[in-house]
Amino acid sequence: MKRICKMIVIAFFYILMLPFGVLAKLTYKLFGSQILFTMFGEFLSLIPSFPGYFSRGCYYQMTLAKADIELFLAFGSYISKIETRIGKNVAIGGRTTIGLAEIGDNAAIANHVSVLSGRRQHNFDDPGSLVVDAEGVFDKIVIGNNVFIGDQSVVMANIGDKSIIGAGSVVVKEIPSYSVAVGNPAKVVKKRTK
Amino acid sequence: MKKIIKNIIISIIFFLTAPIGYTSKILYLFFQSTILYVFFAQFFALVPGILGTFVRASFYKQTLKKSYLDLDIGFCSFFSKIETEVGKSVLITGHSQIGLVNIGDYTVIANYVSILSGRYQHNFTDPTKKITDEVNDTYNCIHIGSNVFIGDNSTIMANIGNNTIVGAASNVIKPLPPYIVAVGNPAQIVKQRIKEPNQPVAV
């Protein structure tokens, strides 16, 4: 019964989000422009509580390369790249910004986290050029299944399956599977074993 | 004169937000549901400027376990748990998210601060289980003393004593005593705030 009610609510929000999703996806497909995708994504991030969760889930299911309709994206969070792929049963906390990433199933990301589009997003090799002109490379960050990322973390490298990143960590190098990593820069402090 | 005008404006806003605030509170008291509370806490977080500060102060006065009308809470900040207690003249600036806490009087919290509901809010013990099933584990109330300052981008997971200063981008994972300065990830004590070392600490 509860499941049916939820499906009806989701269907309602899906219809509501259809114009946003279709417009954003069309401009991307036709012109390769993410301008509308970003605008609607940021706008929808401002809807509070449960109407917001449903709208964002439906919107990102329509626009992203892969996302589940039950994606949980809390207040103030948005995804800034349309090529991002997100698995099933993923929960993302408030005010989190996600760049170009591939997130596995059952992952949980806490509040105030930044997932950048790789370490080379801003390339400042030439000291003679202006910092604002610096052109970087957008790499896809791969976050495995069953990963937890704590509050205020910054992620710039891949994270393996079943790993846990503590709050306030800065991940600059790849974290292997089944590890607990904390600190700035994040270091593996423990292995998770059965 | 200025004070009178301010008080009149606050009274009007308190009166206007009363239906929403008390409905959320009643829903919590009778049905233990915080669905309306969370919705309006996030909704009022988006009201800009001084108007937003008054609206949020009124709303939290009506809903939280303890809160005062002189609470100054900035744009996009909100309390996610209705059981929170906040002291007198507390200042919280923008974009902070605050869990289950008990904040003392005259405390200042800067921008982008996360205050979790204890260190064991997410307690992952069994690596064979799904992470999303273990996320909401234990909520412990964090006690933040009076006259405390918490710097920008800090994460707080443990209690903080009175008159303590926490530097920007610190990660507090162990309880901090009163009258100290702590910084870093994990936060470590770098200075005592008392001039004479043997002076008794007022708690």
Image (cartoon, coloured by chain):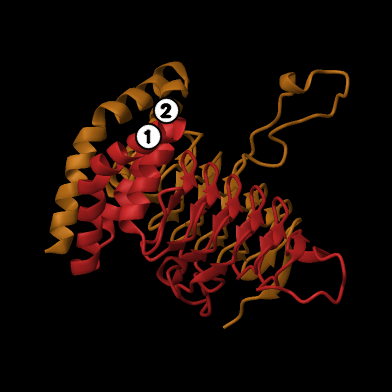
Chain colours: A orange, B red
Relative side of B167 to B15, left or right:
right
Closer to the camera, A90 or B120? B120
Mark 2 neighbour class, 10 Å CA radius: few under 14, some 14 to 19, many 20 or more: many
Q: Which residue is mark 2?
A: A37
Residue that appears at 67% across and 47% down = A156
In primary-sequence order, the first of circles 2 and 1 is 2
Q: In the image, residue A171 lies at what x, y percent?
A: 69, 54
The vertical placement of B116 against A45, above or below, is below
Please indicate, yes or no, whether residue A60 appears anywhere in the rendered image. no
Q: Which mark is residue A63?
A: 1
* Amino acid identity at mark 2: Phe
Relative side of A12 to B136, left or right:
left
Relative side of B134 to B40, left or right:
right
Q: In the image, residue B133 lies at what x, y percent?
A: 40, 70
Q: In the image, residue A59 lies at what x, y percent?
A: 33, 37
Q: Mark 1 falls on what kind of element? A: helix
Residue that appears at 16% across and 63% down = A2
Image quadrant for the N terminus of chain B?
A: top left
The image quadrant that residue A56 belongs to is top left
* Amino acid identity at mark 1: Thr
The image quadrant that residue A185 belongs to is bottom right
Between marks 2 and 1 in the image, the one whose residue lies nearer the viewer: 2
Q: CA distance from mark 2 to mark 1?
A: 8 Å
**Chain ID, mark 2:** A
Q: Are marks 2 and 1 in contact (CB under 8 Å)?
A: yes
Q: Which mark is residue B88?
A: none
Q: Residue furthest left?
A: A1
Residue that appears at 72% across and 72% down = A189
